[in-house]
Image (tube, rainbow, N blue to C red):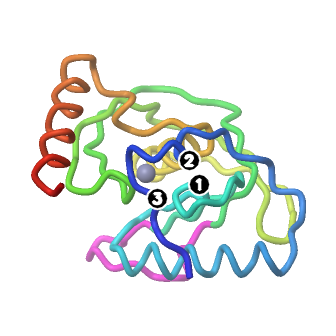
Amino acid sequence: MLDIVYYSDSFLRKKAQAVQSFDENLHTLLDEMYVLMIERNGVGLAAPQVRHSLRALVINLPDEEGEQHKENLLEVLNPEIIEHSGKILFNEGCLSVPDYYDDIERSEKVTVSYHDRFGNAHTLDAEGYLAVALQHEIDHLNGILFVDRLPLLKRKRFEKAFKKQQRCSA
Ligand SMILES: [Zn+2]
């Protein structure tokens, strides 16, 4: 069974490898990532967060009632942001960085090219919440965490709080 890799595990810093086999192993991984994401109340999960060095991510945004439906599940492999515009400030969290939320500046709109689980190519225009989720998860494939995008002072405060928390639980 999969488990979440937590900050500050160095695995989260690796650049993930392109998906080349759109086979049963990949499908099993995607299915298990979906189950784990829902179990942990996440809206997105990238393969490096479950210790798989693959350019693969899943996103399942809630509807207006806050419910997640599997028919809205987005499986994104080998994504590339081919266009981006605008700016948006969004309160983000991450399953790999528990109990920390902060406002991060992202592009408001992105166009992403990607493959689905069968290797078919797609292009997606996203804005707002979905654009933010895509950028957050694509960052994971490049070894970047949302806290890396905090302004320096906030970033230092995060490090300090993290170290203190570690001392307390040690
Ligand atoms: Zn994350």
Q: Is residue 140 left or right of residue 87?
A: right
Tag 2 near tag 3, CB within 8 Å:
yes
Tag 3 near tag 1, CB within 8 Å:
yes
Q: Residue 65 at what x, y percent from top left?
A: 26, 77
Q: Quadrant of the C terminus?
A: bottom left
- Which amino acid is tagged 2? Phe
Q: Is residue 116 above or below residue 151?
A: below
Magenta highlight range = 61-74
Q: Residue at x 71, y 81 (%)?
A: 28
Q: Residue 22 at what x, y percent from top left?
A: 86, 69
Q: Is residue 160 above or below residue 34?
A: above
Q: Quadrant of the N terminus?
A: bottom right
Q: Residue at x 50, y 36 (%)?
A: 144
The circle drawn on residue 11 is 2
Q: Secondary structure at mark 3?
A: loop
Q: Secondary structure at mark 2?
A: helix
Q: Confirm whether the magenta stretch covers residue 134.
A: no
Residue at the spot of label 3: 5
Q: CA distance from mark 2 to mark 3?
A: 8 Å
Q: Residues within 10 Å of mark 1 (few under 14, many from 20)?
A: many
Q: Is residue 127 above or below residue 77?
A: above
N-terminal-most mark, 2 or 3: 3
Task: Give the number of the mark in front: 2 or 1.
Answer: 2
Q: Main secondary structure of the magenta part?
A: loop
